[in-house]
C-alpha cells in the first residue's frame, strides 16, 4: 500500500472510533449523570526509513466533557444532584470510584447505595446507614443527611486534584488515577437528579459529518485500489 493509502486508512480508523463514541453518547442521552465523550485527533510522523517520512492522523485520545447537566426535579427523598464541581464517592468491588449519578436507594441492611448496589461513602470513606424506621429525610447543602432533624451522616463530595487524571469505568463511573480532595464549593440538592450533558441534536449532526467523511475516505480507497489493479494488469500485459 502506498503512502496515500496508509494515511487514509489511519484516518478511517479514527473516524470509526469517533462514530462509536458518538453512538454511545446518543444511547446515553437520557442516562442520569452521564458525561459526553469526544475524540481528539492528532498528527504523527512515521519514519519510512527507505523514503520520505509519512504524516498520518491518529484518533486515540478520548475527551470527556464535565459540563454541568440540567437538574430535573423528581421529589424522591433519595435522589440527589450536585451543583458545581464535584462527584459522589462510592465503593465498588474494584475500589473507590466517582460518579455524578445520584439516584440512590438502600440495600437490605439499610446502607445508602447506587442502583448497581455500590455503597455511597461519607466524607470519611465510610458507608452511610439510613434506619428503616427513619421519618422525614433532610439534606443540607453540604451533604449532611438527617432524619427527623437527627444527623445520620454526610455524603462525601470530592474531586480529583487534576481533572485530566479521571478515567471512565462503565457508563457513569470514573476512577481517579491521582489523589482526590474535598469539593467544598459543591452543593447537594435533594429531590433532583442531574441529567446527561449530551446534546442529542449536536451529536446527530456530528454523526452525519463523520459518516460523510468516512464515505469520502472509502471512495478514495476504492479508487486507489482500482488504480493499482489497473497498473498491475498493464504491467503484466507488457
Image (cartoon, rainbow, N blue to C red):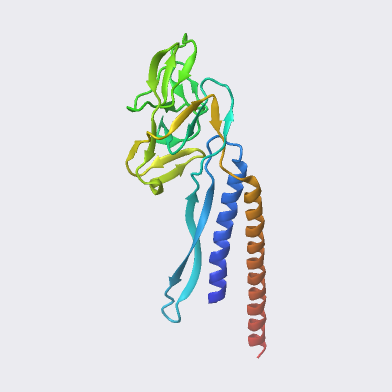
Horizontal and vertical percent position of residue 107 = 47, 19
Q: Is residue 1 visible?
A: no
Between 238 and 219, the residue placed more toward the observer is 219
Q: Residue furthest bottom?
A: 238
Horizontal and vertical percent position of residue 207 = 64, 54
* Image quarter of the N terminus: bottom right
Horizontal and vertical percent position of residue 235 = 63, 87
Horizontal and vertical percent position of residue 193 = 55, 30
Identity of the residue drawn at 61% across and 41% down: 29
Identity of the residue drawn at 44% across and 26% down: 141
Identity of the residue drawn at 56% across and 50% down: 21
User: Which quarter of the picture shows residue 76?
Assistant: top right
User: Which quarter of the picture shows residue 127?
Assistant: top left
Between 179 and 60, the residue placed more toward the observer is 179
Taking 235 as reference, is 97 above or below it? above
Identity of the residue drawn at 57% across and 72% down: 5
Q: Is residue 217 visible?
A: yes
Between 50 and 47, the residue placed more toward the observer is 47
User: Which quarter of the picture shows residue 46?
Assistant: bottom left
* Image quarter of the C terminus: bottom right
Amino acid at each position: 500500500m502506498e503512502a496515500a493509502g496508509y494515511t487514509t486508512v489511519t484516518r478511517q480508523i479514527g473516524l470509526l472510533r469517533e462514530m462509536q463514541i458518538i453512538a454511545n453518547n446518543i444511547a446515553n442521552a437520557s442516562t442520569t449523570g452521564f458525561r459526553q465523550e469526544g475524540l481528539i485527533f492528532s498528527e504523527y510522523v512515521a519514519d519510512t526509513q527507505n523514503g520520505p517520512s509519512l504524516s498520518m492522523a491518529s484518533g486515540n485520545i478520548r475527551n470527556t466533557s464535565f459540563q454541568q447537566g440540567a437538574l430535573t426535579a423528581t421529589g424522591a427523598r433519595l435522589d440527589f444532584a450536585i451543583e458545581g464541581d464535584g462527584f459522589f464517592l462510592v465503593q465498588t468491588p474494584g475500589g473507590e470510584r466517582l460518579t455524578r449519578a445520584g439516584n440512590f436507594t438502600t440495600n437490605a441492611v439499610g446502607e445508602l447505595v447506587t442502583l448497581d448496589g455500590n455503597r455511597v461513602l461519607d466524607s470519611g470513606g465510610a458507608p452511610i446507614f439510613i434506619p428503616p424506621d427513619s421519618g422525614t429525610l433532610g439534606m443540607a447543602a453540604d451533604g449532611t443527611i438527617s432524619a427527623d432533624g437527627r444527623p445520620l451522616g454526610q455524603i462525601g463530595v470530592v474531586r480529583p486534584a487534576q481533572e485530566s487524571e479521571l478515567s471512565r469505568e462503565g457508563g457513569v463511573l470514573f476512577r481517579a488515577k491521582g489523589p482526590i480532595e474535598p469539593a467544598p464549593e459543591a452543593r447537594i440538592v435533594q429531590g433532583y437528579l442531574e441529567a446527561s450533558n449530551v446534546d442529542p441534536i449536536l451529536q446527530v449532526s456530528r454523526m452525519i459529518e463523520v459518516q460523510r467523511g468516512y464515505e469520502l475516505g472509502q471512495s478514495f480507497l476504492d479508487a486507489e485500489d482500482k488504480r493499482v489493479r489497473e497498473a498491475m494488469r498493464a504491467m503484466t500485459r507488457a
